Image: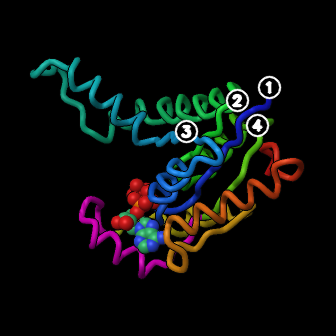
Amino acid sequence: MKQGLIVLLNGTSSSGKTSISSELIRQKEILFHHLSVDDFFNNYNDFINRKLPDELPREIDHQAVSQIVDDSIVSVYYSTVKLFSEMGLNVIVDTVIDNDKRFSEFMDACSGQPLLYVGVLCSREELVRREQARGDRHIGLATSQFDNVYRFNEYDLEVNTEQLNPAECAEKILNAIKSDIHDDIRRGSI
Ligand SMILES: Nc1ncnc2c1ncn2[C@@H]1O[C@H](COP(=O)(O)OP(=O)(O)OP(=O)(O)O)[C@@H](O)[C@H]1O
C-alpha cells in the first residue's frame, strides 16, 4: 500500500491555511485528513482543565506550563502526521512552523514520507487587515511570525492568498499533486 501524501501548509497566522484546508477537504477527487496543531493543544487544555483541582498547592504561570508541555505536544502532532501517512492516509498539516528546531523536527519526523511543501503567502498589510476583521487573533501575531515563518521558503509550490481565493489555492495544490503524483513529490528531504 502507498504511503499517504503529507501537504505541509506553511504560512503565518491569518495567511489562509485553514481556509485552504477546508477547500481541500470539501473536494472529493483526492481524500484528505486535516490535522491542525490547534486540535492537539485544545484537547490537552480541556483535559488539564478537567483534571486540575481548583486550588493548586503551588501556582505556576501560564508560560511555565507551556514550556513544560508544548514541545511534547508538538512532537505527538508530528508523529501523528507520520502515522497517518504510514497508514496510507493523505494528510494536511495546518500549523505555524517559525523556528529551526520545529522545522528540523518536522522534517526528521516525516522524512521518507511523500511531502508537498506549500508556501501560503500573504503580505503583512493584508495579514493585519485580516486580523482586525476576524477579531479572534491577537493583533500583531502574524507580523511577529512573518520573517521567521517565510524563512523556510524552499517550497514545492506557492499560493498567494491575496491573489487567489481559498478554492483557487486548493485547486492549484490539487493540480500540482495530480501532475507530480507519479514521480516528483519529494520524500521529506529538503
Ligand atoms: N484567499 C483568501 N482571500 C481572502 N481572505 C482570506 C483568504 N484566505 C483566508 N482569508 C481570511 O483570512 C482569515 C484567516 O484565514 P484562516 O483562518 O484560513 O487563516 P490561518 O492561516 O488558518 O490562521 P491561523 O493560523 O491563525 O488559524 C479568515 O477571516 C479568512 O476568511
Give the Cα separation between the discs numbered 3 and 1.
Answer: 17 Å
Q: Quadrant of residue 98?
A: bottom right
The amino acid beneath tag 4 is: Gln
Q: Residue at x 52, y 47 (%)?
A: 25
Magenta span = 120-139
Residue with the mark numbered 3 = 33
Rendering quadrant holding ligand 1: bottom left
Q: Position of residue 97 (x, y in %)?
A: 55, 52
- Say if mark 2 contacts mark 1, CB within 8 Å: yes
Q: Earlier in the sequence, mark 3 or mark 1?
A: 1
Q: Nearer the viewer, mark 4 or mark 3?
A: 3
Mark carried by residue 1: 1
Q: Which residue is mark 4?
A: 113
Residue identified by numbered label 2: 88
Q: Hey, what amino acid is under mark 1?
A: Met
Q: Earlier in the sequence, mark 4 or mark 2?
A: 2
Does the residue tagged 4 have its C-beta within 8 Å of any atom of ligand 1? no
How far apart marks 4 and 2 lie (CA) works out to: 10 Å
Residue 17: image location, x then y, percent: 50, 58
Q: Can residue 95 be seen from the camera position used here?
A: no
Q: Few, some or many C-alpha atoms within 10 Å of disc 2 (few <14, some 14-19, many ≥20)?
A: some
Label 4 vs 1, first from the N-terminus: 1
* Residue 13 against residue 121 in the figure, above or below: above
Q: Nearer the viewer, residue 183 or 38?
A: 183
